[in-house]
């Protein structure tokens, strides 16, 4: 009986121990599983952290790049501002010098008539800008072309619009007096349409002393120089040639020096220049011509019917 009871106790004990062992195994298994899951999460988080660090670095690099670009732009802006200030002060100095020279010159009688032939063209607008900058008036002897609307601009800015002929074709205009007046009337009509008044200031293509007309009609210049006066016109030659028509793209320094040399030892000058589309070097030379003439004591005016004609002394035909 005692032995039986002991067996039962022993059996229970075994059952309890076995149960405890099974339970512990189960618990350990679960814990391992959790550890595995945690490990997985840790490795996932590590990957996230490394991705985050990577994109953080990228962003930091982008910010640094943008910073350096910003600094570059700022320094460019500063340099541009400095250059702008320098040009403004240079311009102000130039204006002061011009005003000073003009004051000095207001007491002198030296006078310059700048004239531009064979336009208008796009270069006429550039010439007008330069003249405006120096507050200088000039005269434009125009022909008939597709830029007729610029004739109005010339007049609006206070310059004289003179007639040069419509076609500027020597064989045509110098073939007869009638042909010359037909051509002159054609440009006169264009000018009147643009500025509302007839111009009575003219320049013969090639000047009154031209030789070329002899090939087309003997004695025509002798006849025309008389008859234009009878017809109410005043013709103007020149006494200083810029030489800008002596070739294509004549160097601007040559044009400038021709004018300034030609102006020496004179009191009254009429300067021949051209404002066709091919005369960009004339435009380039103009500021230095004006400044040089101011320094020589000249003041500037536009031609009118009351101006001395500058007629060439000897006719060649
Ligand atoms: Zn001409």
Image: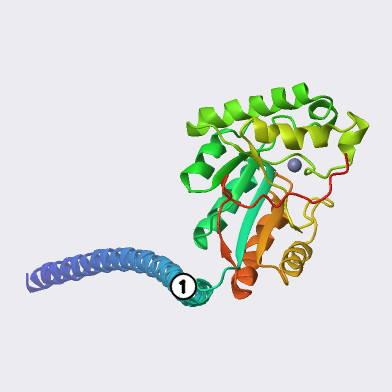
Q: Nearer the viewer, residue 159 or 84?
A: 159
Q: Nearer the viewer, residue 9 or 203?
A: 203
Circle 1 is placed at which residue position? Answer: 88
Asked which colour scheme the image uses, the reply is rainbow
**Residue 139 horizontal/vertical position (percent):** 60, 48
Q: Nearer the viewer, residue 3 or 140?
A: 140
The image quarter in which residue 25 lies? bottom left
**Mark 1 element type:** helix
Q: In which quadrant of the rendered image does the C terminus lie? A: top right
**Residue 29 horizontal/vertical position (percent):** 29, 65
The image quarter in which residue 78 lies? bottom left
What is the tally of numbered marks visible in this picture?
A: 1
The image quarter in which residue 28 lies? bottom left
Q: Is residue 172 left or right of residue 185?
A: right
The answer to whether residue 180 shows anywhere in this view is yes
Q: Is residue 99 above or below residue 170?
A: below
Callout 1 crowding tier (Cα within 10 Å): few <14, some 14–19, many ≥20 = few
**Residue 108 horizontal/vertical position (percent):** 55, 72
Q: Residue at x 52, y 63 (%)?
A: 134
Q: Nearer the viewer, residue 150 or 258?
A: 258
Q: In which quadrant of the rendered image does the N terminus lie? A: bottom left
Does the numbered disc 1 mark a residue whose Cβ is under 8 Å from ligand 1? no
**Residue 312 horizontal/vertical position (percent):** 78, 50
Q: Is residue 248 above or below residue 89?
A: above
């Amino acid at each position: 009986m005692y032995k039986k009871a002991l067996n039962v106790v022993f059996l229970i004990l075994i059952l309890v121990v076995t149960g405890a062992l099974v339970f512990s195994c189960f618990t350990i298994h679960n814990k391992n599983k959790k550890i595995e899951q945690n490990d997985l999460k840790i490795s996932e988080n590590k990957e996230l952290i490394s991705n985050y660090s990577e994109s953080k670095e990228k962003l930091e690099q982008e910010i640094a790049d943008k910073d350096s670009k910003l600094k570059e732009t700022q320094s460019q802006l500063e340099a541009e501002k400095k250059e702008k200030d320098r040009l403004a002060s240079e311009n102000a100095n130039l204006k002061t010098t011009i005003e000073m020279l003009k004051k000095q010159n207001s007491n002198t009688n030296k006078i310059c008539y700048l004239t531009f032939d064979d336009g208008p063209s796009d270069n006429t607008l550039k010439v007008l800008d330069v003249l405006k900058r120096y507050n200088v008036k000039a005269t434009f002897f125009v022909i008939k072309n597709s830029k007729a609307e610029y004739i109005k601009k010339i007049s609006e800015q206070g310059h004289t619009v003179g007639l040069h002929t419509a076609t500027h074709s020597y064989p045509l205009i110098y073939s007869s007096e009638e042909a010359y007046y037909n051509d002159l009337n054609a440009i006169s009509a264009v000018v009147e349409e643009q500025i509302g008044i007839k111009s009575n200031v003219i320049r013969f293509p090639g000047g009154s002393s031209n030789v070329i007309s002899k090939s087309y009609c003997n004695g025509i210049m002798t006849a025309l120089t008389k008859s234009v006066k009878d017809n109410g016109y005043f013709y103007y030659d020149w006494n200083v040639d810029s030489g800008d028509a002596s070739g294509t793209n004549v160097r601007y320094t040559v044009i400038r020096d021709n004018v300034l040399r030609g102006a020496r030892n004179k009191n009254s000058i009429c300067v021949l220049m051209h404002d066709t589309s091919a005369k960009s070097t004339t435009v380039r030379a103009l500021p230095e011509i004006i400044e040089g003439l101011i320094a020589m004591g000249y003041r500037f005016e536009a031609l009118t019917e009351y101006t001395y004609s500058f007629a060439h002394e000897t006719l060649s035909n």
